[in-house]
Image (tube, rainbow, N blue to C red):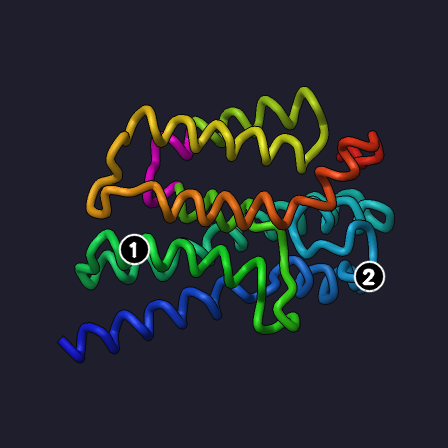
Amino acid sequence: MEFIMNINLILYLSAYLIAGIPFGYLLAKQFAGVDIKNAGSGNIGATNVLRVVKEKDPKLAKKLGAATLFLDAIKGIIVILVAKMLGAPESVLWTIAVLSVVGHCFSAFLMFEGGKGVATGFGVLLVMMPIPALIAIVVWLAAGKGLKISSLSSLIALTAFIIASYILYPVVPGIGSHAPIWIIAIIIFYKHIPNIVRLFKHEEAKV
């Protein structure tokens, strides 16, 4: 029992720390010589990488934006897959999912600041609830193409995920509760408060 608890603690800490790696910041700094924390919106996510680097090199901006999006998504998935291989129960997997989003949004490597949690959140949710996550991704792509506002598209997609999760999983397998989903959603909505304020003021930038 103690061994299992120790393994779980290692998984939880790993999830938080790995998800806290600020790939957007590192990639923009290394390949474009830009500190995205002090440019654009100041966010370390793919959208700000794309927006800021585009001013110097549009082609490079697309590559770094795509790389940031992929890495931010995959870093939340890694520990969940390891935990699955170890036979961890659903409660542990959901805890890892939540901690991955917490790690990205409140990174220990950035003085507990971080990104908005969208890519990392959808990464872990894609593993935990594939169909609702795929529905949300389709909604995100459609909203993004139509609205061209990253933050609003992400929030619409997140809302779509929550609705789909209740329809397809009235009782979440293994835990019987949507609590982890709501924790992830609240964190993402919280990190988007400045964007929401700008949306109401009609000041939110388009991509």
The residue sitting at 24% across, 35% down in the picture is: 171
**Of callouts 1 and 2, which one flags the residue occurring earlier in the amino acid sequence?**
2
The residue sitting at 43% across, 43% down in the picture is: 182
The residue sitting at 71% across, 38% down in the picture is: 196
Give residue 24's position: percent from left, percent from top: 65, 57
Nearest the viewer among 28 and 92 is 92
Q: CA distance from mark 1 to mark 2?
A: 35 Å
Residue kind at label 2, given as amino acid type: Asn
Circle 2 Cα neighbour tier, 10 Å, few/some/many (<14 / 14–19 / ≥20): few
- Residue 72 occupies which quadrant of the picture? bottom right
Give residue 96's position: percent from left, percent from top: 36, 59
SS class, disc 1: helix
Q: Residue 51 has which mark?
A: none
Judge left or right: residue 207 versus residue 186.
right
Judge left or right: residue 177 versus residue 48.
left
The residue sitting at 38% across, 59% down in the picture is: 78
Split into 4 quadrants, where in the image is the C terminus? top right
The residue at which mark 1 appears reads as 93
Nearest the viewer among 145 and 30 is 145
Residue kind at label 1, given as amino acid type: Leu
Give residue 38's position: percent from left, percent from top: 82, 61
Q: Which residues are magenta?
A: 126-134
Q: Are marks 1 and 2 in contact (CB under 8 Å)?
A: no
Q: Residue 38 has which mark?
A: 2
Magenta region includes residue 127: yes
Judge left or right: residue 44 versus residue 39.
left
Split into 4 quadrants, where in the image is the N terminus? bottom left
- Residue 2 occupies which quadrant of the picture? bottom left
Magenta region includes residue 95: no
SS class, disc 2: helix
Q: Is residue 104 above or below residue 169?
A: below
